[in-house]
Image (cartoon, rainbow, N blue to C red):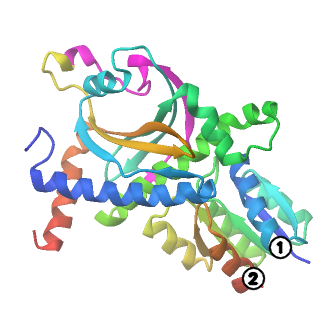
Amino acid sequence: MKTVLLVDDSRVARMSLRRSIGALLPDATIVEAGSADEAIIVAGQNTISVALIDFNMPGRTGLELAEELRQSYPDLPMALVTANIQDAVAERARALGMTFIPKPPDAASMQAFLMGDAA
Amino acid sequence: MTDAFFTDVQRDALTEMMNLGVGRAASAFSKLVGDEVLLSVPNISLTTVSDAVAQFTGGESRAFAGVMESFDGFIDGTAALLFPGERSLELVRAVIGEDMPADEISDLEEETLAEIGNIILNNCLATVANALRKRIHTSLPETYRATGDAMFPFLDANPRAEANGLVTTPMLLLVQIDFSLRERDIGGFLAFLIDLKSTEAFRSAIDEYLAELGV
């Protein structure tokens, strides 16, 4: 069974992501973090199978978090979920081996990530 | 018509980019609310702060709910999404669902507004930056309430000096938008206040873009 790590400083964004993950993976366990620092702690306490990470957060950005997670979890499938759809941001995400998902995510890209890349 | 900021062709290019940006924002927004809200094609204008205040308040002291983000990069400034304050709760309901208890909805109102603003403003700014092949950094969204001529609280503008013909305020790029919420419409607008010191950089980025198009 999958454990999905959801990192976003907006509670509303987490609620909406939780809803779309639930629709695709009803049995998944979803753990949440509101910042990069919190995400590191939550990742240490759970066996994470996939991570969805916001870009713009107070403190460290989602890309900085992904870099750190990548060192500890080299095979962890990660997606950057952001409304900041700049090419430069998408390129940096891909360079870290992340999937880039524009926010709010549509069902197709969530499905492709959760059931394709991260399956 | 050439204005204080742009030539005709520069303004055309900018309008086209903003149209693309708002188009993207509209599609992002409709995904957020499950296609229950439509965001219309905008009317874009470059104006001054005092004219904008007059246009949107209609002389009355209307209350607005706003979300703002500052941005920096090839241009610096502040972006804001504003709509009539009394209607903002309807927008929030559309996003988080009607089935939620009233006290929880009001609890989530500010955060929902922040997320709506974040998605719409970022889509617009990122689309313009992508088209111009430049980079822009946006701050976290902040919600605020404003009345009448205080609708741009982040602005050090002096509308009186402006009215006297002294350009002391930033360039204001206004984008009128219309949220169609089932049978009801909520008219709002996006305001991009671009620092005067960035105007030259903005113009040359648009010129580079036009040169590539062979204009």
Badge 1 marks a residue whose secondary structure is: loop
Closer to the chain start, of discs 2 and 1, is: 1
Do the residues bearing badges 2 and 1 touch, measured as CB atoms within 8 Å?
Answer: yes
Q: In which quarter of the image is the C terminus of chain B?
A: bottom left
Towards the viewer: B210 or A60: B210
Badge 2 marks a residue whose secondary structure is: helix
Residue carrying label 2: A115
Would you say B138 lies left or right of A43 here? left
| Spot occupied by residue B36 in the image (x, y as percentages of width and height) | 60, 53
Q: Report the magenta residues as a range.
A: B137-161
Would you say B46 lies left or right of B87 here? left
**Chain of the residue under label 2:** A
User: In this rendering, do the residues under marks 2 and 1 share a single chain?
Assistant: yes
| Residue type, mark 1 in image | Leu
Would you say B85 lies left or right of B191 here? right
Which residue is at a point 18% across and 55% down the rendered structure image?
B12
Does residue B167 show up?
A: yes
| Residue type, mark 2 in image | Met
| Spot occupied by residue B136 in the image (x, y as percentages of width and height) | 40, 55
Q: Residues within 10 Å of mark 2 (few under 14, many from 20)?
A: few
| Residue A17 vertical placement versus B79 (above, below) | below
| Spot occupied by residue A21 in the image (x, y as percentages of width and height) | 77, 67
Q: Is residue B156 magenta?
A: yes
Which residue is at a point 63% across and 58% down the rendered structure image?
B34
Q: Is residue A42 magenta?
A: no
Residue carrying label 1: A25
| Residue A34 vertical placement versus A26 (above, below) | above
Q: Number of numbered discs present?
A: 2
**Chain of the residue under label 1:** A
Which residue is at a point 78% across and 73% down the rendered structure image?
A24
